Image (cartoon, coloured by chain):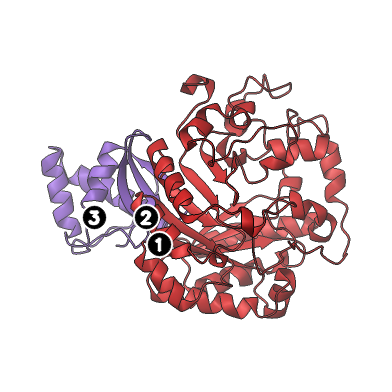
Amino acid sequence: MSEATAAIASDARPRLPHGVRLVHSEAQGGWVLLAPERVFKADAIAAAIVKRCTGEATFAAIVDDLAKTFNAPRERVLADVTTMLRGLADKKLLEL
Amino acid sequence: MVADASLGLHNPLGLLAELTHRCPLGCPYCSNPLALDPRESELATPTWARVFTEAAALGVLQVHLSGGEPGARRDLVAITAAAHAAALYTNLITSAVGITANSLRQLAEAGLDHVQISIQDSEHASADRIAGYVGAFARKRALAAAVVNLKIPLTVNVVVHRANIDRIEQMVALALALGASRVEIAHVQYYGWALQNRAALMPSAEQVARATEAVDELRRRHHGEIVIDAVVPDYYARLPKPCIGGWGRRSLNVTPAGKVLPCHAAESIPGLEFWSVREHSLDDIWKNSPAFNAFRGTAWMQEPCRSCARRDIDFGGCRCQAFALTGDARATDPVCHLAPSHDDVVALAAVQEDAPYAYRRM
């Protein structure tokens, strides 16, 4: 991820759009993000992030929560989550 | 018989449910087989419900309710509700003719997750001519508006060929104007009806080159605004497509009469034994039906596929195309530049004639 990623406003409330949902599938071996005619595998970290995108929690609160849950530096979590959520939004899998 | 991933057995992700072959449109590239299933042979509602339950147990996550025109089934709402009850992501693939704003509302209430509407062209008259149905274009615009109004995500599917390939920019603009979040630019795949109309549909090499550039440019321009997925023009490719992600690997297709196929064109390969959901469970069919095991894994391959570094990437290409163009379903897909018969594909792409379409009819 060498490209600079645009920041996400602290008070943004990311959410999955209509027609996108995160489900757990035993048969497919874990979490998957279901979207219009597409299926994306989500690892445990990605699933933990997406699960918090409820449309209610602010971006700042999500980052705080993740930093605490995974006992990781907030700066680092902020950068990683920004990159991931921007990537999802570009694919129309998330609304910011 | 086959029972582990090393032999090519995975869990399927997607089920294409061809609810009916009936359709008011007559698109000359229709993906249905030449021999269409009559209405009397169609599976009943409870059978579809059982198929969806068995599909979910097998690992299937998404069901594509397709046809023909699925709106031709009077029990479409019940079928959709059954798929939703089985916890499947439900996708309606429609021509828009046969679905009204009212029936759409009932489908949304039944749990419909997504709608794909086909558009034949950005120009009204040309679109209706390609569909072989006067008034189709206006109906599509109306249904698209109803879909967006109900906040259901919309994909616009455009099949491109010689008559519309120069208007990709306009077709993407139309998809945006209709409120789609995704647009599929799919070059015609030459099987069945399209194979019969090949010379009338085939674009020129220059058109294909311009279209490829246009898609790249439109993706840059509309980045984050609309997802543009493209299906490559086979006959102008150097590498074959990994057909449906590998034979019997990721998806299955149930015909209106209940036969289960690895892909929608599989019946064009003679000698394959397909099993029906009327006699077998989906699990049994997926694991044991002769048709599904015919081209699973890589053991069936011949050279140059057998020793190719890409054999687990593109699986030797498309079996139906290999058969259609070489007469041998085990041959390398002739689209591949390494195939002995690749030059034949190049020669076939050069055959372009403005003949009237042979429209798809029952």
Chain B shade: red
Name the kind of residue labelled 1 in the image.
Leu
Q: Secondary structure at mark 3?
A: loop
Contact between marks 1 and 2 (CB within 8 A): the answer is yes
- Select label 3 or label 1 by which is in front: 1
Q: Chain of mark 2?
A: B
Which of the two discs, 1 and 2, labels the residue nearer the N terminus? Answer: 2
Task: Tell me residue A1's x, y (percent).
Answer: 38, 43
Q: Chain of mark 3?
A: A
Residue at image mark 2: B84
Looking at the picture, tell me which residue is in the foreground, B239 or B248: B248
For the residues labelled 1 and 2, the Cα–Cα distance comes to 7 Å
Taking the image as drawn, is residue B48 in sight? Answer: yes
Looking at the picture, tell me which residue is in the foreground, B268 or A80: B268
Residue at image mark 3: A53
Residue at image mark 1: B112
Specify whether disc 3 shares its chain with disc 1: no
Left or right of B344 in this view: A6: left
Task: Tell me residue A5's x, y (percent).
Answer: 34, 53
Q: Dot 1: within a 10 Å radius of its alpha carbon, few (fewer than 14), some, or many (20 or more) residues?
A: many
Quarter location, residue B332 = top right
- Select label 3 or label 2 by which is in front: 2
| Residue B192 versus residue B361 in the image, above or below | above
